[in-house]
Image (spheres, rainbow, N blue to C red):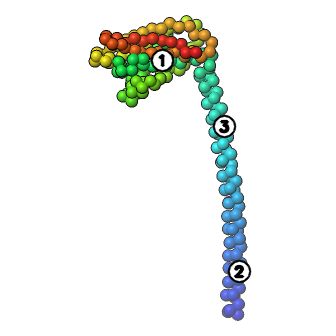
């Protein structure tokens, strides 16, 4: 009698252990399937979010910068070695819209023929005034500050203005000219 009670307890303990193991294995299998399902759901949601972000960005560009009211102003240097550009300020209808201080790297880029986009914004159709203030050091080491205004008519569509800076020898006086791009 003493031996049967121990073996019966062992059998019951083994059966409990086997049942517990089966429950654990089934839970692991269910969680693995659920994890795979969650991974797939996360990938689908990430793709949806990316798609929505693209649409929101496109709408934002359309609302903030509609093509029929857009004005873009670009800067170029005509006399590449005559001016050491320090800063440019831009005003549209008396309101400041852009200001830029130049680093050595940016100056070098402009001197190599680069074009800088100074401003992009919206402007209603009609008559407007663009004013620019430049500060620079000329080739004869004089520090100069020049203001220039340009009156223009904005029509429906995109208007692109090129602002060119030049300073010719012997006086190296900076001159600012404007040209509309087609």
Q: Nearer the viewer, residue 150 or 76?
A: 76
Name the residue at the left extreme: 141
* x and y, in percent, of residue 153 in the image: 56, 7
In the rendered image, which residue does mark 3 sit on? 51
Q: Residue at x 34, y 11 (%)?
A: 173
First reached walking from the N terminus: tag 3 or tag 2:
2
Q: Is residue 129 above or below residue 21?
A: above
First reached walking from the N terminus: tag 1 or tag 3:
3
Give the label, 3 or 2, closer to the camera. 3
Q: Is residue 20 above or below residue 103?
A: below
Q: Residue at x 37, y 14 (%)?
A: 167
Q: Is residue 29 above or below residue 79?
A: below
Q: Nearer the viewer, residue 31 or 120?
A: 120
Q: Distance of mark 1 from mark 3, alpha carbons?
A: 33 Å
Q: Is residue 153 left or right of residue 132?
A: right
In the rendered image, which residue does mark 2 sit on? 12
Any part of residue 94 in sight = no
Q: Is residue 14 above or below residue 114?
A: below
Q: Distance of mark 3 from mark 2, alpha carbons?
A: 58 Å
Q: Are marks 1 and 3 in contact (CB under 8 Å)?
A: no
Q: Quadrant of residue 64?
A: top right
In the rendered image, which residue does mark 1 sit on? 97
* x and y, in percent, of residue 17 in the image: 68, 76
Classify 10 Å Cα crowding around label 2: few (below 14), some (14-19), many (20 and above).
Answer: few
Q: Is residue 46 left or right of residue 136?
A: right
Mark 1: which secondary structure? strand
Q: Are marks 3 and 2 in contact (CB under 8 Å)?
A: no
Mark 2: which secondary structure? helix
Q: Residue at x 57, y 10 (%)?
A: 154
């Amino acid at each position: 009698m003493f031996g049967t009670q121990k073996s019966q307890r062992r059998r019951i303990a083994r059966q409990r252990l086997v049942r517990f193991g089966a429950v654990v294995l089934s839970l692991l299998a269910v969680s693995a399937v659920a994890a795979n399902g969650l991974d797939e759901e996360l990938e689908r949601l990430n793709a949806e979010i990316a798609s929505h972000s693209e649409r929101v960005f496109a709408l934002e560009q359309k609302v903030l910068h509609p093509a029929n009211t857009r004005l873009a102003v670009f800067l170029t240097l005509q006399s590449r070695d005559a001016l050491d550009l320090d800063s440019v300020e831009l005003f549209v209808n008396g309101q400041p819209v852009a200001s830029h201080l130049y680093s050595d790297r940016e100056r070098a880029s402009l001197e190599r023929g680069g074009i800088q986009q100074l401003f992009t914004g919206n402007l209603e159709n009609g008559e407007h005034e663009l004013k620019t203030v430049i500060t620079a050091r000329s080739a004869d080491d004089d520090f100069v500050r020049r203001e220039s205004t340009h009156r223009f008519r904005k029509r429906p569509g995109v208007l692109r203005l090129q602002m060119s800076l030049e300073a010719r020898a012997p006086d190296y006086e900076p001159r600012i000219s404007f040209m509309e791009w087609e």
